[in-house]
């Protein structure tokens, strides 16, 4: 009697394959964010094995399976195979609770084989579980790492995800054909630049402000110190941005634009994010060691306040705005400390009120974006303490802060301090109407929803802002 050739079952790995991330790392990150004090007690479960640890972690936090970054090409493939009557299994080292929720979300799996709190279903253990369940039924396996080699060795075909040439050669040496490949996995240089938000480094040019204001920008030693501070702040800022993106994973994945960020989309994993943080923090420490002690303290304060803002303060009413303004002002203080240039009370007062106005522009942009996505329905912006009904109040606060900054400048121009630096101080009064125009324009653009999320970055890209800055510089030169 002629034997019937069985269609191989399709066994699908989850972490790094079906989803572009590691579910355990995501759960640990969520635990760190929501219940940091429970990390130690959770770690004690490691004494009972990695499977027990996974069960302990996932029991303490909940996640939304629909928000995970799935590999859409793989989902399309397994749906196509399922429609042809092929047996589809989800086989993963992730905990059973997590795997069940993912499988329920996808809705094509015959069964789920996963770690059960006792056995960590990885490598040989996973291969044994597949053989036991299928009872000698042939299978193909979709995986992504060297840990999957024991499963591929016993399969009738390998489907490799993000594979390297070495991995493919080893699979071929087993005599197992690679029937399909899903390319990807290599982190591009552009992805790294996007993750550390290089475009945001423009804000750190504020460290040079004290040198311009004190007319010491041409002193090489001071300029070099400010340049070192600029580099240290860039590394520090990127460190905080990566931390912020990791802590905001779920919120970013629900956001229409932010879902494309490297960590939210799965282009970079939580593990890679941790390595980037370690590298950038080390770079910050290395560069900061070249700076004066006061500048080092300001950089430490910047990192701590930025991290606190990312974790908690950005959801607090108006505290978030004053914190943002404080971080901008810290850059100015840091530049002054590095170059040994005293920061006058006039500069501090002007900076605080101006940056409060700009921080309000940032919140206006978010309110406008939320309103557009929800057809103008009043409601709270996710992760923020503001709703549509706060719109008018926020605009008023932004206008008041901006104009107070101009008032501080006007009072300064009428003080004896100006005559020590400028031969024709009265010409400086032309800066006041220029600033009134610029601040008013920024608020109007933010209110229209036409501004980049960060007003400082918008300023560096805005032609009208460049024209105003050039006019202010010309007035300052004429006044010398």
Image (tube, helix red, strand yellow):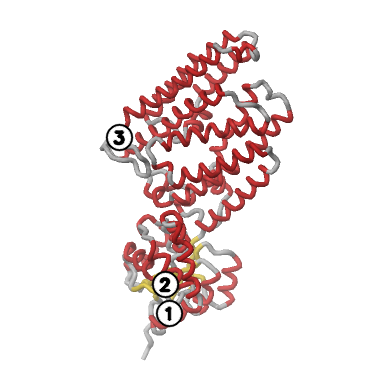
**Residue at point 54%, 26% (across, down):** 348
**Residue at point 36%, 68% (across, down):** 97
Q: Residue furthest right?
A: 220
Give percent across and percent down for residue 431: 53, 15
N-terminal-most mark, 1 or 2: 2
Q: Is residue 436 visible?
A: yes
In the rendered image, which residue does mark 2 sit on?
A: 91
Query: For residue 473, what is the image quadrant?
Result: top right
Q: Is residue 217 left or right of residue 468?
A: right
N-terminal-most mark, 2 or 3: 2
In the rendered image, which residue does mark 3 sit on?
A: 388
Label 3 vs label 1, nearer the camera: 3
Query: For residue 443, what is the image quadrant?
Result: top left
Give percent across and percent down for residue 363: 40, 34
Q: Nearer the viewer, residue 29 or 448?
A: 29
Q: Which mark is residue 291?
A: none
Labels 2 & 3 near each other (Cβ < 8 A):
no
Give the position of the N terminus as an image quadrant.
Answer: bottom left
Instruction: Find the distance from the CA under tag 1 to the CA under tag 2.
Output: 9 Å
Element under label 1? helix
Give the position of the C terminus as an image quadrant.
Answer: top right
Labels 1 & 2 near each other (Cβ < 8 A):
yes
In the rendered image, which residue does mark 1 sit on?
A: 129
Q: Residues within 10 Å of mark 1 (few under 14, many from 20)?
A: some
Q: Nearer the viewer, residue 254 or 188?
A: 254
């Amino acid at each position: 009697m002629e034997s019937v050739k069985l269609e191989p079952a399709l066994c699908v790995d989850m972490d790094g394959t079906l989803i572009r991330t590691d579910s355990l790392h995501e759960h640990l990150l969520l635990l760190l964010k929501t219940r940091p004090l429970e990390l130690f007690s959770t770690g004690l479960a490691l004494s009972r094995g990695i499977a027990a640890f996974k069960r302990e972690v996932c029991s303490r936090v909940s996640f939304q399976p629909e928000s995970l970054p799935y590999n859409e090409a793989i989902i399309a493939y397994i749906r196509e195979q399922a429609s042809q009557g092929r047996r589809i299994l989800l086989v993963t080292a992730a905990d059973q609770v997590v795997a069940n929720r993912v499988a329920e979300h996808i809705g094509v799996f015959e069964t789920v084989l996963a770690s059960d709190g006792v056995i960590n279903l990885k490598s040989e253990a996973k291969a044994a579980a597949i053989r036991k369940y299928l009872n000698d039924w042939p299978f193909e396996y979709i995986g992504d790492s060297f840990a999957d080699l024991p499963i591929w060795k016993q399969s009738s075909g390998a489907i490799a995800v993000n594979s390297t040439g070495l991995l493919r050669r080893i699979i071929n040496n087993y005599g197992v054909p690679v029937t399909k490949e899903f390319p990807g996995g290599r982190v591009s240089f552009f992805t790294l630049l996007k993750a550390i938000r290089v475009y945001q480094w423009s804000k750190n040019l504020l460290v040079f402000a004290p040198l311009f204001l004190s007319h010491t920008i041409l002193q090489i030693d001071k300029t070099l110190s400010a340049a070192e501070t600029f580099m240290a702040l860039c590394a520090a800022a990127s460190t905080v941005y990566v931390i912020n993106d990791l802590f905001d994973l779920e919120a970013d994945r629900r956001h229409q634009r932010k879902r494309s960020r490297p960590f939210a989309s799965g282009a970079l994993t939580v593990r890679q994010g941790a390595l980037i943080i370690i590298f950038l923090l080390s770079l910050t420490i290395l560069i900061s060691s070249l700076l004066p002690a006061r500048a080092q303290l300001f950089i430490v304060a910047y990192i701590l306040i930025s991290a606190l803002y990312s974790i908690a303060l950005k959801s607090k009413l108006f505290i978030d705005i004053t914190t943002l303004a404080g971080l901008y002002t810290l850059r100015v203080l840091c530049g002054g400390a590095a170059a040994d240039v005293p920061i006058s009370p006039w500069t501090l007062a002007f900076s605080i009120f101006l940056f409060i106005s700009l921080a309000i522009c940032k919140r206006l942009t978010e309110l406008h974006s939320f309103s557009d996505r929800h057809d103008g329905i009043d409601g709270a912006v996710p992760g923020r303490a503001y709703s549509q009904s706060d719109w008018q109040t926020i605009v008023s606060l932004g206008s008041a802060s901006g104009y107070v900054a101009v008032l501080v400048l006007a009072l300064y121009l009428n003080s004896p301090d100006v005559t020590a630096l400028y031969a024709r101080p009265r010409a400086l009064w032309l800066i006041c109407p220029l600033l009134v125009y610029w601040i008013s324009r920024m608020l109007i653009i933010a209110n229209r929803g036409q501004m980049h999320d960060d007003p400082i970055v918008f300023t560096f890209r805005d032609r009208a802002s460049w024209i105003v800055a050039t006019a202010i510089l010309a007035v300052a030169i004429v006044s010398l």
